[in-house]
Amino acid sequence: MSKRLLALILLIALATIAPLVFTIIVKMDVPRALKSLGLYYVKNTINDTASPETVTAIVWDYRGLDTIYETLVLYLAIVGGLAVFRVKEVALKTKIGLTSFARSSTRIISLLIATISLAIALHGHLTPGGGFPGGSALAVASMIVIPVYSANALIARGITSTRLVAIRGFALTGIGLVAFLPTIRGLEIVTNQAFYPATVLGQLISGSISLYNLFEFLAVMSGFTAVALYLSIPEEVFKVAEGA
Amino acid sequence: MLEQYTYALIISVLTINAVVAIYGIVYRRSLTKKLIALTILGDTVFVAIIFSGFYFTHPIVPPVYPEPSDVHVDVLAKHASDPLPQALVLTGIVIGLAVNALIAFGIIQLYRLKGTTDAKKLVETLVEAGVAE
Amino acid sequence: MILTLVLLIAASLLSLAFVYLAITERDLLKAAAFSAGQSVMYAIMLQTMGAADIVMTYVAVSVGLYSALLVFIISKTERCEG
C-alpha cells in the first residue's frame, strides 16, 4: 500500500516539476487565436446550413457521410455482440428487485432523465447536444431501471429485445431515407439546404439536421437498451442451455 | 508565465496518463483490467485532440450563435473554441463505445467457455492444445 | 482567466492520481470506481476548454455506460485480479 502511494507522489512531483523546468529553459509561445479552418466554419455555418450550432452542422451537414458510416459501425457492433450471446426469447423466472425506497426514487429519476434526453435530442440544432447524447442518456436510465425493478418488469410491459431491435431497424431505415431522398431531384446524397426546408411553420428546423437527430436518438436508445436486457439474463440460463 | 506553465503541464499530464495506460494494457493480467486501461487510453487521446483547438482568450465559449447577426460573428471569431476537433471527437467517442462493448461481450463469452479471465492461464491452455507456443 | 488556469491545473493533476490508482488496483470494482472518477476530471477539463457538445456525450458515455458495462462484466466473471 505504501509503495503505491510513494510511486503516486513521485509521478505527481514529476508532472509538476518537469513543465516548470521546461518553461524556464525554453521560451515558447502559446496559441492566442483561432486556427483559420475553424474560423471558416465559425463564420459560414449560419449561411450554409441554417443551424446556429456549429458542431452539429459539421457533424450532420459538412461531414454527414462520416456520421452515417459511424452509425453503421455502431449498428454492426451491437449485431455482433447480440449474436455472441445467441439465446432465444427467454421467460425470466426472477422477479426480485430492490426495496420500495429504491423503486420510488428510481421512478422519479428515470422520468426526469427521459424528459431531459428527449429535449437534448430534439434541440440538437440549436444548443449543444444532438441525437447521440440524448440516446445515451436514455440508455443510462434503462440501465438504472433494470437492476431496481428486475428485467422482468420491462419484458412484462412489452419492451422485449425483439421489439427494440425492430425499432432500431426502423430508425436506421429513416436515416437512410433522409440521406437518399435528395437523389430524386438529381442532387447528391446527404444534401441539406438544397432540398430540405430551413423553417417549417415559422420554427427553425435546419432542414435534415432535426430529422437526423430524431432518428439517431431512437436508434441509439433502442440499441443500448437491447444490450442491457441481454446482459441482465442470469448465468444459470446459459449453463442450462449449454448443458442441454 | 502561468499560461506557458499550464500549457506544458497539460501536455505532460496527458503523456504520463497515456504511458500508464499502455503499461496497464501490456503488463496487467486480467482481461477486465486491460479493458479499463483501453478506455482510459482512448479518453486521453480525445482530450489531447480537443486540447489542440484550445487557445488563451478571456472567456472561451462554445461555438454557438445566440442569434444570427454580424455582431456575433465578430465576437465568436475571437472567443469561440475550435469546432472541427469537437466534431471529429464526437465520431471517435461513438466508435470507441461500439468497440469496447464488443470486447465486453467477448470477455463474458470467453469466461463461460474457459472458466478464467487471466491472460497467462488462457495462453497456457492454448499451448497445451498445441495451437500456440 | 486565473480561474480557468487553476481549474485546468487542479483537474489534470487529480486525473493523473485517479489513472494511476485505477491501473494498479487489484480489486476490479474499485478500479471501475477510480475510472469513473478519472472521467469526471476529464469532463471538468473539457468544459473549461469550451467544448460543451463533447461534455454531454462524454459524461453520458464514460461515467454512465462504461461504469454500468464494467459492473455487468465483473458480476459475470471474476472480481479480483491475479
Image: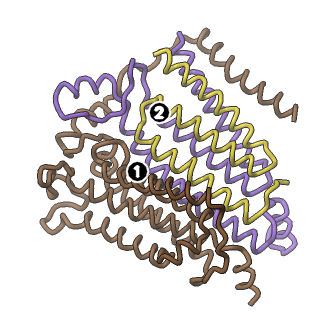
Chain colours: A brown, B purple, C yellow
From the viewer's perspective, tell me whether residue B61 is left or right of residue B45. Answer: left
Give percent across and percent down for residue A37: 31, 34
Give percent across and percent down for residue B52: 46, 31
Relative to A76, say whether C51 is above or below.
above
Q: Which residue is mark 1?
A: A116
Residue sitting at x 63%, y 32%: B15
Tell me which amino acid carries mark 2.
Gln
From the viewer's perspective, tell me whether residue C49 is left or right of residue C82. Answer: left
Tell me which amino acid carries mark 1.
Ile
Name the chain letter of the residue that bears numbered label 1. Answer: A
Indicate the quadrant containing the C terminus of chain A: top left, top right, bottom left or bottom right.
bottom right
Relative to C13, say whether A132 is above or below.
below
Q: Which mark is residue C47?
A: 2
Residues at marks 1 and 2, CA–CA distance in whole angstroms: 19 Å
Q: State the residue in front, A109 or A194.
A: A109
The kind of secondary structure element at disc 2 is helix
Within the image, what quadrant is residue C71 found in? Answer: bottom right
